Image: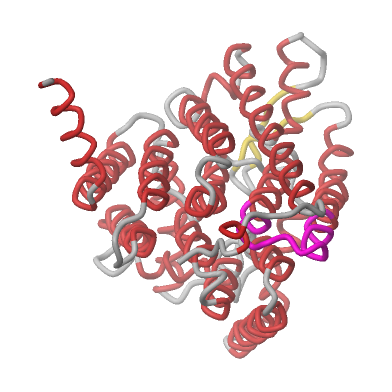
Amino acid sequence: MGDRRSSRGIRRLLAGRGAIWVAFALVHAGLVALNLFAPGLPLGDVTGVYRIWAENAAHGYARMGIDLPWVYPILAFAPMAASLAFGGEWFGETWLALVTVLNGLTLSVLLGQATLSRHRRIAAWWWLGFLALLGPIALGRIDAVTVPFAMLGLLWAAGRPRAAAVLLTIGAWIKVWPAALVAALVVALRRRAEVVMIALALSLGILAVSLVAGAGGNAIGFIGEQAGRGLQVEAPLAVLWLWAIVAGAPGVRVAYDREILTYQVSGPGVDVAAWLTTPLLAVGVASVLAVGIRAARRGAPLGRLLPPLALAFVVVLLLGNKVGSPQFVAWLAAPVVLGLVLRPARFAVPALLAAGAALLTHVIYPYWYGWLLVADPAFVLLLTGKVVLLALLLAWALRRLWQAGNRVALPAHELASRPG
């Protein structure tokens, strides 16, 4: 009897907002500590690259994306500049504080002001677990700034489509991937014309300000910068060449590109594969778009359409990407959280698959990243397992999208499914 009461008491404690906020503080404190003190320099890009870009601009030397071509869209500079608020010596700590604040605001919206529902509680606990599994990379890259914009945009999609369009467009001008979520909104929402107009107007405004600042062609230079990259070692397609190294194939190796500061695979066929990623990615996006449009035209309700559509778009970007950096896995949080808020039982499988991908990413990076760079068989196997999990995620999302487009009688509560 005492054990039952104790169990019920624990469940009540974990069901409250207080427990979730305590967990939020603990998870983020742990991630901050790992970023600052763990081996493998998990915060290296922030303190060794972002800080230099920000300081160069502050001293009038060069503004990335304006005076020089840049790999990121122009708004990516905003959080980097903000992280100089307390000086270059505190750049890393300020960056981590900024991302923590953004995540805190997102959690506040996710939990809402009304009585905390079971669905939102599940989504919140999953997100915190996902961040912990993903490790320091969950905070230590520019992608960490975009995830809150993406998550809020999806959560507000039904009730506040204009705000959602603004948030996702801003996210896309920080790091391109949220543009796929704008496309998901255009397909899934009835007020799609508003989403398109807001996204276009805001994008034109950002471009205009960039041109006034003197950017010229550099305002969209990130498109060419990405297109010219080789096949990065973590890219899903690079697994084939990593296994070739394991097998002892001649002429295949991992090399460091000093121009874009990444490790890439090189060897026979790599350049062709790197070039093919762009058309393959286009085909993948078009395929998801076609299945999503089919479901929308057949009257699929938002609750059944938007979560798997957003997830499919994100996973296609992950699988077809020739960069494949470990932090990209953080993108999965936005569509999975939306799915758990709307349909937690149906989204249990992708939640588990995404968590598994986060864990494998954390094992590989940053602590033992060097083993992947020398194509150690165990770590190549881990990367292969991650790619398999992503492929399973895509298969699940496409299957759900197709089912959403089937002409079947839907229960009334599904027709009314909307995020709050």
| Quadrant including the N terminus | top left
* Residue at 58% from the left image edge and 12% from the top image edge: 378
Residue 113 lies in what quarter of the image?
bottom left
Residue in front for this viewpoint, 12 or 412? 412
Residue 63 visible (yes or no):
no
Report how many numbered discs are placed on residues in the image: 0
Residue in front for this viewpoint, 338 or 42? 338
Residue 226 lies in what quarter of the image?
bottom right
- Indicate whether residue 293 is drawn in magenta: yes
Question: In the rendering, at what x and y percent does residue 191 appear?
Answer: 67, 79
Q: Which contiguous range is marked in magenta?
A: 291-307
* Residue at 62% from the left image edge and 69% from the top image edge: 68
* Magenta residues, dominant SS class: helix
Residue in front for this viewpoint, 368 or 60? 368
Q: Is residue 91 above or below residue 160?
A: above
Residue 362 visible (yes or no):
yes
| Residue that sits furthest to the left in the current view | 2
Question: In the rendering, at what x and y percent does residue 19 appear?
Answer: 21, 45
Q: Is residue 44 above or below residue 248?
A: below
Question: In the rendering, at what x and y percent does residue 369 appear?
Answer: 51, 26
Image position of 138 (left or right of 116): right
| Quadrant including the C terminus | bottom left
Image position of 83 (left or right of 174): left
Residue in front for this viewpoint, 400 or 247? 400
- Indicate whether residue 64 is drawn in magenta: no
Tell me the colour scheme of the image.
Answer: secondary structure
* Residue at 28% from the left image edge and 57% from the top image edge: 97
Residue 395 lies in what quarter of the image?
top right
| Residue that sits furthest to the top in the current view | 247
Image position of 21 (left or right of 298): left
Question: In the rendering, at what x and y percent does residue 379 appear?
Answer: 58, 18
Q: Is residue 2 above or below residue 115?
A: above
